[in-house]
Image: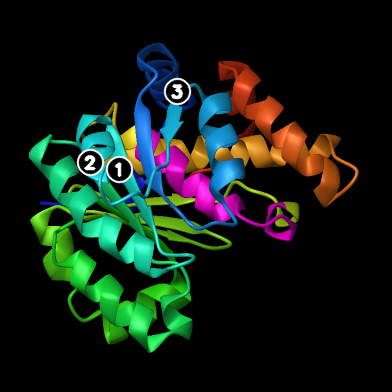
Amino acid sequence: MSLTVAASTELLSAGTVHELLLRVREKTPRVHTITNAVAQNFTANVLLALGAVPSMTIAEEEVAGFAGSADALLINLGTLDETRRAAIPLAIEAARAGGHPVSIDPVFVNRSPVRCAYATELLACGPDLVRLNAAEMEALFPGRAGVEELIAAGTVFAVTGEEDKIESRSGDFRLSNGHPLMARVTATGCAGGAVLAAFASVETDRALAAACGLSVFNIAGEIAAARACGPGTLVPELLDALYAMSLTDIEARLKAA
C-alpha cells in the first residue's frame, strides 16, 4: 500500500536530503544528457557544481557507448531535431541494458502534437522518472489516463510548479522550495532535470531521489536569488550555491508538507 503524502514527506528530513547530496558528491556519477541546444552549457555546469559529471554527445555512432557506460540517462525534448530523434532510442536501449535509470523531460509537448506523439512512444519504455509541468502532464495524459498504470509499473512523476508534486507507487511528496527569479533564466528547469537524474543514480527509491534532487536545486535557487541582483547574476550564484550546499542550508530552508 502506498504511503500517504504526510507519511512519505516524513522521510524527507534535511539529513536525508544532505545524505543523498553527499552520495552524489562522493560517487561523482556521470549523467549522459541528451538535452536541448539552449540548455546544454548551463546543464553541464550545474552537474559539475553539484558534484556529478556530464556527457552530452548526440552522435548516432557513439551515443550508445556513452549512455550505456553512464550512471544515468536524461532525455530532454526541448529541441527535438532529427539528430536527437535518431540518438534517443539508441541511448535508452543502452542505458536499459546497463541497468541505469532513465529520466524523460517532455518539454513543451503541450505545444506540439508531433512532439507529444513522440514523447508518448518514449514513455512506453517505462522510464524511471518523468519530470514535467501540469500542462505537459495534461497533454500526455488527458484526464490522467494512463498515469496510474505507469506509476504501478514503477515510473515516478515529478510534476513541477508553484508546489512540486512527486507521485510514485511507494508514496508521494509535496515540496515548495524555489524562487520566482529562477523562471527568468532560460534552461533552469532543464538543468534541474539533470540534477534529478544524478540523484536517481545513487538512490534506488526514485521518488525519494527526485524529492531530494528537487529540494537541493530549488534551495540553491533560493540562496542564489537572495544574493543576485537579477537574472544575470542568478546563474553564477546558483552554481556557487550548489557547489557549497551544506546541511545547515538545507535545515534552514527545506519546505516539505
Q: Earlier in the sequence, mark 3 or mark 1?
A: 3
Mark 2 and mark 1 in contact? Answer it, CB < 8 Å: yes
**Residue 246 on image: x %, y %:** 59, 17
Q: Residues within 10 Å of mark 3 (few under 14, many from 20)?
A: many
Residue 186 colored magenta? yes
The location of residue 256, given as percent across then percent down, is 49, 44
The residue labelled by disc 1 is 73
Residue in the image at 30% along x and 86% along y: 142
Q: Is residue 8 magenta?
A: no
Element at badge 1? strand
- Classify 116 as above or below 47: below
Residue 74 image point, x, y percent: 35, 47
Q: Is residue 200 above or below residue 181?
A: above
Residue type, numbered disc 2: Pro
Tell me the residue that label 2 is attached to: 101
Name the image quarter holding residue 153: bottom left
Residue 11 in view in this figure: no
Instruction: State the separation of the CA atoms marked 2 and 3.
Output: 17 Å
- Mark found first going from the N terminus, 2 or 1: 1
Residue beneath the point at 21% across and 81% down: 145
Q: Which mark is residue 21?
A: 3
The label shown at residue 33 is: none
* Residue 79 makes an appearance in the image: yes
Q: Nearer the viewer, residue 164 or 11?
A: 164
Q: Secondary structure at mark 3?
A: helix
- 200 vs 176, left or right, is left
Start-end of magenta stretch:
182-198
Q: Residue 167 lies in what quarter of the image?
A: bottom left
Of the residues tagged 3 and 1, which is closer to the observer?
1
User: Relative to 132, is 200 above or below?
Assistant: above
